[in-house]
Image: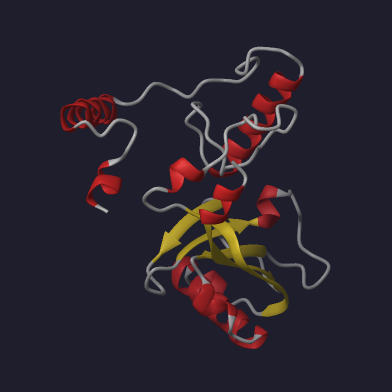
Amino acid sequence: EFRRFANLRGTGVLATRLYLDKMVDIPYSANACWGFDKGIGQTFFDISKLHAIEGNEHGGGSIIEVDYYHAASLLVMDDESIVTKVKKDLDVMLGYTCQQAQVVDAAIVRLPNAVNWYSPGSYANMPDIQSKSIPNVYFVGDIVKTKHGSWSQEKAYVTGAEAANLVLGRPIDTNIISLSPDELHVAAGKQLVSISKKILGLGDQSFVDFLW
């Protein structure tokens, strides 16, 4: 049970935070984006808004966090080059007010193999909430199998609550809010895939596993 976890893979993350000398107009506090580097995804967050910070001790301006995923090719860059790149990306996305602001301080964290990298067949290697070989061992996080349907940080929170419920001897879904029902086209797609898998005799395998 534990040895198969070695089959799971991770991908690199670059976490950055820029402290600016001016407040920047950012329409949304949390944003997903891509397109600057092939194969690399990004998120950026208005930390000033999320944490209700009016200015910062470094310059009185916005604090913006930008994280890059599948970012091994960026981890080898030096700090100065990373800060220049992050500011350039933000200038493109946020426009004039960001272009007029200067970076007065920055924080950079390089995290090789830090985020789960799902691939064909990886689901079979993921742990269940409760260990089958050691009953008083529980697993939580977005790498854990769960029927809830949440993902990423939300899934980590939910699996923690599920594990706590099991430890306390309660039904696994006690006080956990279910996800909203699938939209009609998503539900129809899932049903079509399920029927097709039964016809092909794939069982719990995905089509990707079959083709792989």
Q: Position of residue 195 (x, y in %)?
A: 20, 25
Between 37 and 200, the one nearer to me in the picture? 200
Between 205 and 37, the one nearer to me in the picture? 205
Between 108 and 46, the one nearer to me in the picture? 108
* Residue at 76 percent of width and 68 percent of height: 60
- Pick the quarter of the image with the C terminus: bottom left
Q: Residue 8: in sight, yes or no?
A: no
Q: Report the colour scheme.
A: secondary structure
Q: Position of residue 95 (x, y in %)?
A: 47, 70
Q: Describe residue 199's horizontal placement relative to residue 173 as left or right.
A: left
3 above or below 174? below
Q: Residue 37: in sight, yes or no?
A: yes
- Pick the quarter of the image with the N terminus: top right
Q: Residue furthest right?
A: 57
* Residue at 37 percent of width and 69 percent of height: 35
Quadrant location of residue 186?
top left
192 above or below 100? above
Total marks shown come to: 0
Quadrant location of residue 167?
top right
* Residue at 28 percent of width and 25 percent of height: 187
Q: Position of residue 71 (x, y in %)?
A: 51, 71
Q: Position of residue 115 (x, y in %)?
A: 57, 57
